[in-house]
Image (cartoon, coloured by chain):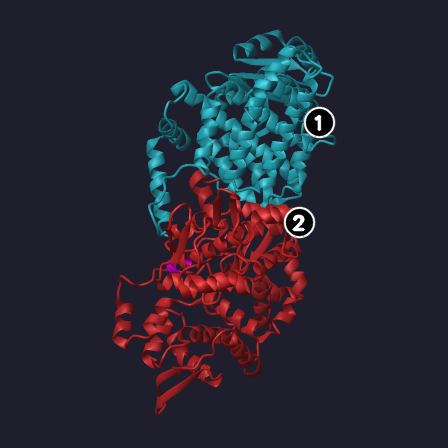
Chain colours: A red, B cyan
């Protein structure tokens, strides 16, 4: 599907508004109104989904502190959610007292918000272009000049929009091989330089095709791709294989690997972690555990010695609900060793080389298994954009929230994020001093 | 077009034939500049570097003058002043005159300057054992230097590389600083360089040759001071002080970088300032200590490969000849390229190109050795072992 068609899918439109707003944070853009509103509404809805009634004062403070929604805008956003039938409001006179979330589950949230956006709000040219750019770039980085030609927008509007994106941090532009490459940090902050370089070298079409292939088969082993030159039914070129090898050799964040006595070391490939630019350390650890689970299962499915996994989904389902696998085998020790190191599970010897595998029952491990299931079933995991601290705070009373906000220890530090080029320049400055 | 071209062309061939590292048209700027704009005082027509066991390189300044009115002794005295500033031991001055006074010649010789008329260049070359007629190397052809300078006119983003090639590198107070600055420049330009463009391959090769040139002096200083340091830490400590100009300067820069980094790298202990890919650099320098004189010759073959990209016809005979003559330089070239291209985050295809180009010179020699004598064969086998 072409990007312009994709944006007709209402849920994608709402998702892109959310991604833009998430990166913008507290930055205000004069050209954006409906986009900001929808983005904030999605963000708030995601965080109150499934909660019991929330005190409005608590909601206001948490929204401002954790979700970057300005205090004055919270009431407007809550009323928007009420119009979109995602919350019920309890009032006393004109004052909102309680908010009762009725946010739909699954992608229905995005779908309903997208429907609201297209029927009740009108996106201006700048907003349409911004959502188009972010959607296009969610699949692969692009060469700026090609993107400009492809989107067909007026040059001035494109340049202004690109500038807003760069200043608002929802787009990043770097120079690779003499070309300006633009990408969205929501999807490509992890190993972004490797993908951007590949786009400068092979073009965005090749990278997009490759990532879509991996998305349809998350955790596919590199050795099989190298040998068969395909992922499922999709053919993979030598250039694309070179990119995959580079990810496993030179990238800052390497894919998980498993070493077995019968198949050697194998790397299991995933699309870049979404929202990795805004993931907290806890969430990142959970995602890493999920990838390790998928890798272990793909090892059993595609590179077994004797006991092949026929249904990866069934195995994850069993681990999630029974917290163990049915029978012991001689392959578990090597196959699940990484999961023992990551404290996802334990191996129990029953004699000889036979081992049972059991999950350590913690909320984090259960969440990792759910993400692993989503990765195998749908190719992507939801919920990465949710701030668990915010959800926790929403369930506390006002006193507690105020104590969090006023506590210096828990105050979030604004950290300076440097782009790839800024890091290179800084390194060059320390190493070389002032260059003549 | 380069000024005084015929004289420079002849002297460039002469320098390369002698196995000296050539650098055309170096701009000399004030040691303490006061103007906000870069203004150069004068230029050196040709700078040659002769490998030296103690210093790494000795410098020879070559001055080419086509005005007949130039006084021979005036030029010699002027060149002596420049030699003092540039720490050069010898100078050669080429004049467009039919005749040079004998007193001028003798006085100039006492100052370390050789005065030659245009016609005498050939006699001098022949007498000092230089073959003049056959093509020597791509970097000995002045046209390739003109092509190199021309290529920057088409790419403004790389202008810093030309400035550095002509001025910045030669302005550095010491070789440690020069080595650091080449890496820093490489880091800054890495996003602009594309391996698909021949001129860019030449720019990378030129920067690499300058990096090895500077590192070679560092190697030579470590060699004369420590011979072969026994522990890695000893080598690392010595190198950091040489690279950053002493303990005080290093500590200051190290503290400053930690202070800045602490603002954007919140977790864990901040690492000390070194060079990018530090372990690889240590390995390169340690390896260079095995044969420091050959390390000093290495920049020649890198620059030759770089300039062969600018020539109308690629010719790697010079590279093959040098690799045949010196057993270590192939290894040093590959290690230097690996370090420099990884440290500056340049696209890996640059490394593949230089590596393949260098390795193919071995393969060619291997083919030749079947028809040559057994001694030569034994020597190549030893060299091959290095790459297994």
B380 over A207 or under it: above or below: above
Look at mark 2 in the image and give the residue it sits on.
A237
Q: Whole-percent x and y of residue A317?
A: 47, 65
The magenta stretch spans residue B274: no
Secondary element at tag 2: loop
Q: Whole-percent x and y of residue B308?
A: 68, 30
Main secondary structure type of the part rendered in magenta: helix
Q: Whole-percent x and y of residue B130?
A: 67, 13
Does residue B154 appear anywhere in the picture?
yes
Q: Residue furthest bottom?
A: A93
B202 over A72 or under it: above or below: above
Start and end of the magenta stretch?
A: A280-284
Q: From mark 1 to mark 2, how far is it between C-alphas?
A: 33 Å
Q: Are marks 1 and 2 in one subunit?
A: no
The magenta stretch spans residue A282: yes
Q: Quadrant of residue A58?
A: bottom left
The image quadrant where one finds the N terminus of chain A is bottom right
Front tag of 1 and 2: 2
Q: Residues within 10 Å of mark 1 (few under 14, many from 20)?
A: some
Look at mark 1 in the image and give the residue it sits on.
B315
Q: Residue furthest front?
A: A351
Secondary element at tag 1: loop
Does residue B78 appear anywhere in the picture?
no
Question: Front-most of A154 and B306?
Answer: B306
Residue positioned 36% across, 71% down in the render: A391
B357 over A435 or under it: above or below: above
Residue positioned 45% across, 47% down in the render: A334
Chain letter for mark 1: B
Q: Residues within 10 Å of mark 2 (few under 14, many from 20)?
A: some
Image position of A355 (left or right of A120): left
């Amino acid at each position: 599907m072409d990007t312009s068609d994709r944006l007709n899918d209402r849920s994608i439109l709402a998702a892109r508004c959310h991604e833009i707003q998430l990166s913008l944070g507290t930055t205000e853009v004069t050209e954006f109104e409906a986009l900001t509103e929808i983005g904030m509404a999605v963000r708030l809805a995601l965080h109150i989904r499934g909660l019991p009634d929330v005190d409005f004062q608590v909601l206001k403070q948490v929204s401002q502190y954790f979700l970057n929604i300005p205090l004055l805008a919270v009431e407007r956003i809550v009323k928007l959610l009420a119009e979109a039938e995602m919350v019920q409001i309890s009032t006393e006179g004109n004052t909102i007292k309680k908010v009762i979330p009725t946010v739909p589950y699954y992608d229905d949230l995005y779908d309903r918000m997208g429907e609201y956006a297209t029927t009740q709000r009108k996106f201006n040219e700048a907003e349409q272009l911004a959502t188009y750019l972010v959607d296009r770039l969610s699949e692969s980085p692009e060469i700026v000049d090609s993107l400009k030609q492809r989107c067909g927008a007026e040059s001035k509007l494109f340049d202004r929009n690109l500038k807003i994106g760069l200043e608002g941090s929802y787009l990043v532009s770097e120079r690779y091989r003499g070309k300006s490459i633009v990408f969205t940090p929501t999807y490509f902050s992890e190993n972004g330089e490797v993908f951007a370089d590949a786009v400068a070298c092979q073009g965005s079409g090749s990278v997009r095709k490759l990532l879509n292939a991996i998305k349809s088969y998350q955790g596919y082993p590199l050795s099989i791709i190298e040998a068969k030159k395909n992922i499922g039914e999709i053919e993979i070129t030598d250039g694309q294989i070179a990119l995959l090898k580079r990810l496993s050799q030179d990238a800052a964040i390497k894919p998980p690997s498993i070493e077995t006595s019968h198949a050697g070391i194998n790397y299991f490939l995933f699309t870049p972690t979404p929202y990795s630019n805004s993931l907290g350390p806890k969430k990142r650890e959970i995602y890493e555990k999920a990838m390790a689970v998928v890798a272990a299962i793909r090892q059993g499915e595609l590179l077994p010695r004797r006991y092949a996994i026929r249904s990866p989904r069934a195995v994850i389902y069993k681990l999630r609900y029974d917290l163990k696998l049915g029978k012991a085998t001689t392959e578990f020790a090597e196959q699940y060793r990484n999961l023992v190191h990551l404290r996802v599970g334990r191996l129990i010897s029953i004699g000889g080389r036979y081992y049972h595998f059991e999950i350590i029952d913690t909320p984090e491990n259960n969440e990792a298994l759910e993400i692993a299931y989503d990765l195998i079933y749908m190719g992507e995991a939801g919920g990465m954009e949710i701030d668990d601290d915010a959800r926790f705070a929403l369930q506390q009373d006002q006193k507690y929230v105020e104590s969090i906000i006023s506590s210096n220890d828990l105050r979030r530090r604004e950290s300076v994020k440097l782009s790839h080029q800024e890091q290179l320049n800084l390194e060059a400055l320390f190493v070389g001093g002032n260059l003549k | 077009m380069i000024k005084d071209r015929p004289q420079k062309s002849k002297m460039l061939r002469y320098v390369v034939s002698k196995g000296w590292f050539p650098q055309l048209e170096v701009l000399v700027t004030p040691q303490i500049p006061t103007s906000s704009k870069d203004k150069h005082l004068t230029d050196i027509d040709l700078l040659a570097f002769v490998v030296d066991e103690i210093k790494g390189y000795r410098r020879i300044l070559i001055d080419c003058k086509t005005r007949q009115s130039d006084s021979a002794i005036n030029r010699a005295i002027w060149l002596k002043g420049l030699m003092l500033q540039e720490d050069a031991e010898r100078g050669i001055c080429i004049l467009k005159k039919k005749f040079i006074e004998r007193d001028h010649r003798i006085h100039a010789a006492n100052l370390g300057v050789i005065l030659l008329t245009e016609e005498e260049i050939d006699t001098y070359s022949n007498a000092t054992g230089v073959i003049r007629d056959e093509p020597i190397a791509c970097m000995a052809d002045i046209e390739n230097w003109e092509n190199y300078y021309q290529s920057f006119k088409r790419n403004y983003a790389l202008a810093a590389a030309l400035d550095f090639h002509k001025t910045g590198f030669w302005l550095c107070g010491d070789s440690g600083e020069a080595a650091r600055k080449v890496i820093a420049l490489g880091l800054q330009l890495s996003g602009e360089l594309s391996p698909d463009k021949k001129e860019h391959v030449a720019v990378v090769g030129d920067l690499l040759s300058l990096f090895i040139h500077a590192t070679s002096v560092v190697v030579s200083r470590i060699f004369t001071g420590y011979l072969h340091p026994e522990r890695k830490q000893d080598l690392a400590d010595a190198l950091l002080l040489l690279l950053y100009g002493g303990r005080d300067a290093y500590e200051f820069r190290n503290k400053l970088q930690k202070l800045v980094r602490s603002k954007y790298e919140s977790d864990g202990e901040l690492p000390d300032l070194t060079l990018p890919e530090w372990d690889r650099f240590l390995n390169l320098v340690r390896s260079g200590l095995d044969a420091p004189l050959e390390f000093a010759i290495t920049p020649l073959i890198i620059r030759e490969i770089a300039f062969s990209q600018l020539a109308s016809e690629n010719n790697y005979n010079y590279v093959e000849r040098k690799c045949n003559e010196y057993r270590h330089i192939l290894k040093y070239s590959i290690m230097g390229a690996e370090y420099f291209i990884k440290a500056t985050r340049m696209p890996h295809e640059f490394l593949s190109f230089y590596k393949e180009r260098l390795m193919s010179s071995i393969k060619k020699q291997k083919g030749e050795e079947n028809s040559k004598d057994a001694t030569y064969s034994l020597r190549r086998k030893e060299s091959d072992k290095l790459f297994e």
